[in-house]
């Protein structure tokens, strides 16, 4: 199991911003797909964002395009998710994942098994109206 060190998250009012981070070992970080998926109660999991650390190609879920930005810091083996213009519908548990390649492909899908295997412990993001 890959070790993921997740931080960030919390509660904010609609329109506010939050930033998540996810650090891994250099071995895991290099030439890999990293990113986040999320799940809200009663809803399906969805891609938030993915980044291919080799060339910084990014992928976003449709619901967050233009509001969220994923980035990387090669010196720290860390990826970040800057979340701006947050909406109540962004409220969910956010899971960092490393090596889960559907995050970095046009079509995203994830099974319960995938989520358990690749997702970190998760961090709660709550956006109030």
Image: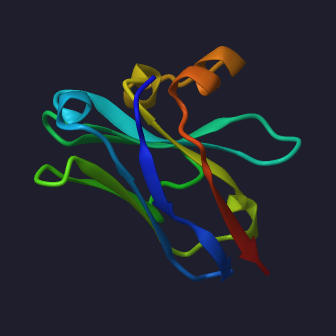
Q: State the residue at coordinates (26%, 29%).
A: 28
- The quarter of the displayed image where residue 88 is located: bottom right
Number of marks drawn: 0
Q: Is 66 situated above or below 104?
A: below
**Residue that protrudes farthest toward the right in the picture:** 42
Q: State the residue at coordinates (50%, 22%).
A: 107
- Left or right, 80 with respect to 18, comes to left
Q: Is 25 situated above or below 79?
A: above
Work out whether residue 67 or residue 10 is closer to the camera in this orientation and state it. Answer: 10
Q: State the residue at coordinates (60%, 48%).
A: 122
Q: How is the image coloured?
A: rainbow
The quadrant of the picture occupied by the C terminus is bottom right
Q: State the residue at coordinates (62%, 26%).
A: 115
Q: Is 73 situated above or below 34?
A: below
* Residue 109 x/y as whole percent: 59, 21
* Residue 87 x/y as whole percent: 68, 70
* Residue 126 x/y as whole percent: 72, 68
């Amino acid at each position: 199991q890959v070790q993921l060190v997740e931080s960030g998250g919390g509660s904010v009012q609609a329109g506010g911003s939050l930033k998540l981070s996810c650090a891994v070992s250099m071995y895991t970080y290099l030439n890999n797909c990293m990113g986040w998926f999320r799940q809200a109660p009663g809803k399906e999991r969805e891609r938030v964002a993915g980044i291919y650390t080799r060339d910084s190609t990014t992928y976003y879920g449709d619901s967050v395009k233009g509001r969220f930005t994923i980035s990387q810091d090669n010196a720290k083996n860390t990826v970040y998710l800057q979340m701006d213009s947050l909406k109540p519908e962004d409220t969910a548990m956010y899971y960092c994942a490393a090596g889960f390649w559907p995050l970095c492909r046009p079509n995203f899908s994830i099974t319960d098994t995938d989520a358990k295997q690749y997702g970190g412990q998760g961090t709660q993001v709550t956006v109030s109206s």
